[in-house]
Image (tube, rainbow, N blue to C red):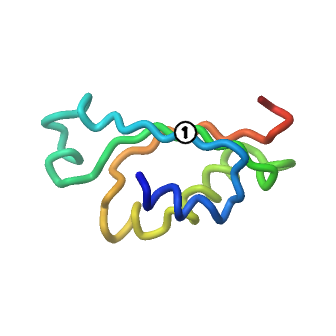
């Protein structure tokens, strides 16, 4: 989760919460292959004026290879808000 926080720093979050739910998915294909299941709550002014899909894409881009090549993240539930929405 430390690496996730470091990568998400590019979005300049004013609040960030990451929960590891991998234990709830024991035996799941992604869990067997080492990919974790996470819940992310992130608040950033950079999300202002952007729809949910665009916000999620920004998160995916920031996490980069953690989602793609290394498969460190198998599943990610994202709640992305602006400071005015909390």
Quadrant hosting residue 24:
top left
In the rendered image, residue 26, in percent from the top left (x then y), is placed at: 17, 34
Query: Residue at position x 34%, y 42% from top?
Result: 37
Quadrant hosting residue 60:
bottom right
Quadrant hosting residue 3:
bottom left
Q: Secondary structure at mark 1?
A: strand
- In the rendered image, the vertical position of residue 81 relative to residue 68, given as above or below: above
- In the rendered image, the vertical position of residue 21 relative to residue 61, given as above or below: above
Tell me the residue that label 1 is attached to. Answer: 17
For this view, does 49 lie left or right of residue 14?
Answer: right
- In the rendered image, the vertical position of residue 75 relative to residue 21, given as above or below: below
Q: Residues within 10 Å of mark 1 (few under 14, many from 20)?
A: few
Residue nearer the viewer, 62 or 13: 13
Residue nearer the viewer, 20 or 29: 20
Residue nearer the viewer, 3 or 50: 3
In the rendered image, residue 53, in percent from the top left (x then y), is placed at: 66, 48
For this view, does 54 lie left or right of residue 66?
Answer: right
Q: How many numbered marks appear?
A: 1
In the rendered image, residue 45, in percent from the top left (x then y), is placed at: 81, 50
Query: Residue at position x 72%, y 47% from top?
Result: 14
């Amino acid at each position: 989760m430390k690496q996730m926080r470091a990568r998400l720093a590019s979005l300049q979050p004013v609040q960030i919460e990451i929960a590891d739910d991998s234990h709830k998915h024991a035996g799941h294909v992604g869990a067997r292959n080492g990919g974790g299941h996470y819940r992310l709550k992130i608040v950033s002014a950079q999300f202002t004026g952007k729809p949910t899909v665009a916000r999620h894409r920004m998160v995916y881009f920031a996490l980069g290879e953690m989602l793609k090549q290394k498969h460190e993240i198998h599943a990610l539930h994202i709640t992305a808000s602006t400071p005015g929405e909390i």
